[in-house]
Amino acid sequence: MRKIDLTNFRVATSETARHINRRIVLNLIRSHQPISRADLARHSGLQRSTVSVITEQLITERWVTEGANGHVPRGRRPRFLHLNKERVGIVGINIRPATTTLALANLDGNFIAQESLPTAEDPNKFIQDLIPRLKSITQVRSELTCEGIGVSLPGRVDSTSQKLVFAPNLDWRDFDLKSPLEEATGLPVELENAANACALAEIWFGRRSEAAQDLVAVTVSEGIGTGLVLNHQLVRGSTGVAGEFGHTTVVENGLECRCGNRGCWEMYASNSAAVRYYTGSKPTASKPTFDDVLRLAGQGDAKALEAISTMAHYLGVGMAMLVTGLAPDLILVIGEITRLWDHVGPIITRTVAERSQTHAATRIVPTDPTSHPRLLGTIALVLQQHFGAPSVA
Amino acid sequence: MRKIDLTNFRVATSETARHINRRIVLNLIRSHQPISRADLARHSGLQRSTVSVITEQLITERWVTEGANGHVPRGRRPRFLHLNKERVGIVGINIRPATTTLALANLDGNFIAQESLPTAEDPNKFIQDLIPRLKSITQVRSELTCEGIGVSLPGRVDSTSQKLVFAPNLDWRDFDLKSPLEEATGLPVELENAANACALAEIWFGRRSEAAQDLVAVTVSEGIGTGLVLNHQLVRGSTGVAGEFGHTTVVENGLECRCGNRGCWEMYASNSAAVRYYTGSKPTASKPTFDDVLRLAGQGDAKALEAISTMAHYLGVGMAMLVTGLAPDLILVIGEITRLWDHVGPIITRTVAERSQTHAATRIVPTDPTSHPRLLGTIALVLQQHFGAPSVA
DNA sequence: GCTATTAGTTCGCGCCACGAACAAAATCTT
DNA sequence: AAGATTTTGTTCGTGGCGCGAACTAATAGC
């Protein structure tokens, strides 16, 4: 139950009912495709006549196409409907400190084209590099009308102004990424924090989360980010900075974090932490990368395994807090660490179980990195503009 | 943006628009009363004609009454509308380990009658004690039609079955409070955890939180409970156990908690913790109550002040986690500790500021205990059934 | 008493879902 | 092979509802 926000609501007009039912039908087609009009009526509870009018509208607007005929034991054969893969294109941009990936996807979340470029240090330079790539990728398939651009960032985005507030690993501050991209392409641009994007990807494309109303995405890389979906909705906080559980304290009077606090979770459970555990406090000439440590651990190197185990323990410590406090159905782990899940998973699960007797139902699962969760999240970001629940009252 | 839950949605009918606009008008009357039809049209964006039809409906259903005429600089004088205080009664029941309070309130959240009874140890006995009281309180004012009963509990309620799962301080488990009360009174009964109820009270009756979309209520008594409202909505978790931040770890390898974990927040920041700080580890013959410690601290007793300060410090430690992780607009503190807020408030604020540079915007405020936040929450629980945003799609 | 202004109502129009009736297309029965 | 049966999809009249123009009611200023 939600309270109506009297500072920001929408009254219903005569078209409101259609808006709502249209979205429902569109979503039913998305999740049951191919599906006949008669089945849509059965699933939705709408009359067949109403479904017919709505689908006709969706077909003329090219969201949906009529496909092959189906087959029923007896009676007239149904005409199957499915999402129009050939129409809508969505561009996703995943910005990471080293490289930026951009991709063109259709409504089903399948990537049609994908390319990378180095991420320039200066955000203005970055925009200049990006724009020609964007223009070319939208023209890969002429029949695809591009509906929008989704952007995933390692940083926080102000939820009202949609400006980048701060991206520590890029050292970008108060930068408006949205406007220049919108001006250059004429397409709507949606920005989102990477962890939030991953959570959205799971909500819209995940197989595990059909009924998950609460999930937390934990991105583990140089730092730790958390994306919260509670009551089927992304939690951004009014200033857009919710989900910074990476900077909650797990070690009293611990190591100083760049956020100014001491003993933050990400100081003990991030990739950088594992590298520190491996090298010890002594400054070495050539610092290994996290990939090195991970590879060594995979090969059975005892010291590397020890470092990874410590990191896994602390991942569990932080996740126990999330499990106890939020009791999500699902915690989704994103990052290189998932490559060693056979080793890491049990440690995390055990640590969480020891510390959170209250709630055993949360499943902690790794994402398949080949599914490009961040990039998929950018697609979801645009997709939800067309498939999300209509905002009413 | 919410994803439509295809396992549980509602299509729009021809009456849906009216449902939505009716709720909007009802809420505008609630928050702007007294208000004229013309002003309602201006605030809502609906046509005056539409507002007239809707208000006529609300008047015939006795939700709203027409009051005195207003006054405008020139032109016909408006007829003011306001909520019908004389019609709707809501019964609230606040169950606490020692005593249970029940009250009758009108739509404005004003208590008309209030009484208490000792809370029986056995839940079945408790029900037997309660039912005659309930029946009598609903008949205090014959003109008030009772719309429902709200119950606040020191424990967790399963969100689907609405059964009490576990109330540690009452030692009640898996008990169905709802059905016997509904059968005895014929009224709909809504159960809710006390911290959640307090959060609801603030959302629906608070003055501070007009625009607060995210707030956390922290109830501090024998234990610590947290009620989360994020995106204007209560977060219950799919199993109804979200918001157990009281059992997240704040001291590594700390004191054993009855939840099975070690070093839980409530072991260090609850009333019981303060008593422990005061008495020290030595077992004393007569253990002081928290009220005693609080009174002594108020009188300037150094040892008591020290105990309260330590408790306040740990309250800050836990709240820093909430601030960093959830970035709420407001943290609401409920409990006896607020009586010494002049002393406690600054300690909490300082501790949170030290540990959460990321988010300075959260206001941490005490509730006035005379406003009966738990009891008010039970009223909100029923109120939202009639004033909450209609569930659509 | 006339004019300007504001409040509230009446009424025709168009959007929309409903549901009965109907057309279309398949299988089953005889 | 022809009619009966079943299922799909369309057509059309009905009623709910918001819109907005026109209208009535009521008040203050001139």
Image (cartoon, coloured by chain):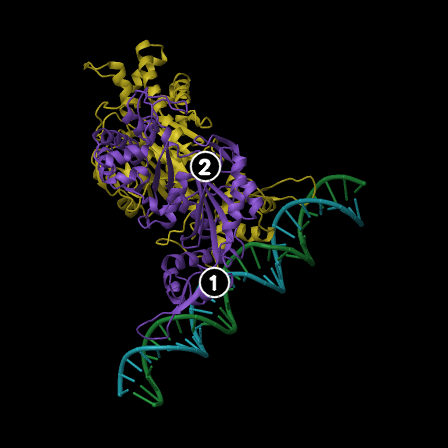
Chain colours: A purple, B yellow, C cyan, D green
Q: Is residue B83 visible?
A: no
Res B382 quadrant in image: top left
Q: Residues within 10 Å of mark 1 (few under 14, many from 20)?
A: some
Tell me the subunit letter for badge 1. A
Amino acid type, label 2: Gln
Mark 2 element type: loop
Q: Is residue A126 visible?
A: yes
Query: B144 or A347: which is nearer to us?
Result: A347
Residue drawn where x is 38% and y is 33% of the image: B198
Res A215 quadrant in image: top left
**Picture coordinates of residue B123, whole percent (x, y):** 22, 38
Q: Is residue A106 left or right of residue B174?
A: right
Return the mark for residue A392: none
As measured in the structure, the alpha-carbon distance from the residue carrying label 2 to the one carrying label 1 is: 34 Å
Residue drawn where x is 32% and y is 38% of the image: A336
Mark 1 element type: helix
* Residue most extreme to the front: A285
Amino acid type, label 1: Ile
Return the mark for residue B213: 2
**Relative to A54, residue A146 above or below:** above
Q: Is residue B183 left or right of residue A122?
A: left
- Residue marked by disc 1: A54
Residue drawn where x is 27% and y is 21% of the image: B273
**Picture coordinates of residue B351, whole percent (x, y):** 38, 20
**Picture coordinates of residue A172, whole percent (x, y):** 49, 31
Query: A150 or B298: which is nearer to us?
Result: A150
Q: Residues within 10 Å of mark 2 (few under 14, many from 20)?
A: some
| Same chain, labels 2 and 1 | no
Q: Is residue B101 left or right of residue B175?
A: right
Tell me the subunit letter for badge 2. B
